[in-house]
Amino acid sequence: DARQMDGYEALESIGSGSFGLIRKVRRKADGKILARKEIDYRKMSTKEKEQLVAEVNILKDLKHPNIVEFLERVIDRENSFIYILMEYCEGGDLAAVIRRHKEKSYVVQLTASVPIPEEFVWSIMTQLVLALHECHCGMIVNEDNQPAPRHILHRDLKPDNVFLDAKKNVKLGDFGLSRSLTNPQKAFAQTYVGELITDSLYDAKSDIWSLGCVVYEMCALEPPFLAETQNELSAKIKLGRIQMLPAQYSQELNMVVRAMLQVNPRRRPTTGELLSNSRIRYTSVQLK
Ligand SMILES: CNC(=O)c1c(C)[nH]c(/C=C2\C(=O)Nc3ccc(Cl)cc32)c1C
């Protein structure tokens, strides 16, 4: 109940995630700074409440250095609020980093963009591949104490959902729209093993496509597909034609981005295949 939140001092609001506001809080016991998602569930439909419960259940047992750490969930029934306590990411979100590089306006108001260094792009991409690998292929011990694959799909990977901590480590956040196949539907999926499992593979490949869009945008400081209307946008996406990255980026980076943005999901690499890319493997070793 609300008294459980007495242990935290509310500080400023730092953003809005799926379902609600995100506030910086200080834990009184030890002064630790955390992020608290504050959700007023009074206005939520039953479906949204189910999605929220699913999100918390997914986050609760996803422990990975590149996924925002979930600490606690507190329900305040008096005020119909749910509080989700998570780790604080001092560096904010990647969308803000891209915006800052895009509009480097100087004293004379000359706006010239400053590119994001290629090393930084590889570092962000590698950490997001590691986070997605944990979601798609991580192993979990299920209810009958057997190791089982997670098959968690993020389904909302975009620069606004990628956060940086004080040491520039990347944290994948906001599993608000994610879906896990390790639940009753999974049994249903097993019965149509051919179709639905490839469906989940398809969904995993759509996370890969989203990752391609994030990496492309870090380099070009523009998303790969831009259009005025939804129809025009989906037409461009189906065509799959993308501009080369700006000249200072390597051929190798161009190749990896193009592979992730393939129109045919089967032609896109899995997280496992991406981790065997020499530059990504080398970068992941540097991160340890
Ligand atoms: C302007 N806001 C920020 O710079 C900012 C900062 C310093 N932190 C955040 C966001 C989060 C943060 O610090 N921890 C989080 C855990 C989960 C989710 Cl979905 C978001 C966050 C943001 C948006």
Image (cartoon, rainbow, N blue to C red):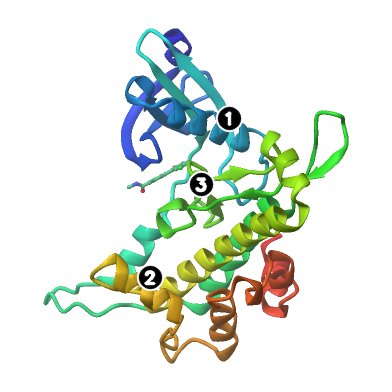
Q: Nearer the viewer, mark 3 or mark 1?
A: 3
Q: Nearer the viewer, mark 2 or mark 3?
A: 2
As shown in the figure, which amino acid type bears the numbered disc 1? Answer: Leu
Q: Image point 63% across, 56% down: which residue?
A: 132
Tell me the element at label 3: loop
On the image, numbered disc 3 is attached to which residue?
173
On the image, numbered disc 1 is attached to which residue?
71
Tell me if label 1 and label 2 are in contact, CB under 8 Å.
no
Q: Image point 75% across, 74% down: which residue?
A: 276
Q: Is residue 235 above or below residue 40?
A: below
Beta carbon at label 3 within 8 Å of ligand 1: yes
Q: Image point 50% across, 64% down: which residue?
A: 210
Indicate which quadrant contains ligand 1: top left
Mark 2 Cα-neighbour bin, 10 Å: few <14, some 14–19, many ≥20: some
**Disc on the earlier residue, 1 or 2:** 1
On the image, numbered disc 2 is attached to which residue?
234
Tell me if label 3 and label 1 are in contact, CB under 8 Å.
no
Q: Is residue 226 above or below residue 87?
A: below
Evaluate whether residue 131 shows in this view. Answer: yes
Residue 232: quadrant of the picture:
bottom left
Evaluate whether residue 116 shows in this view. Answer: no
Tell me the element at label 1: strand
Tell me if label 2 and label 3 are in contact, CB under 8 Å.
no
Beta carbon at label 2 within 8 Å of ligand 1: no
**Disc on the earlier residue, 2 or 3:** 3
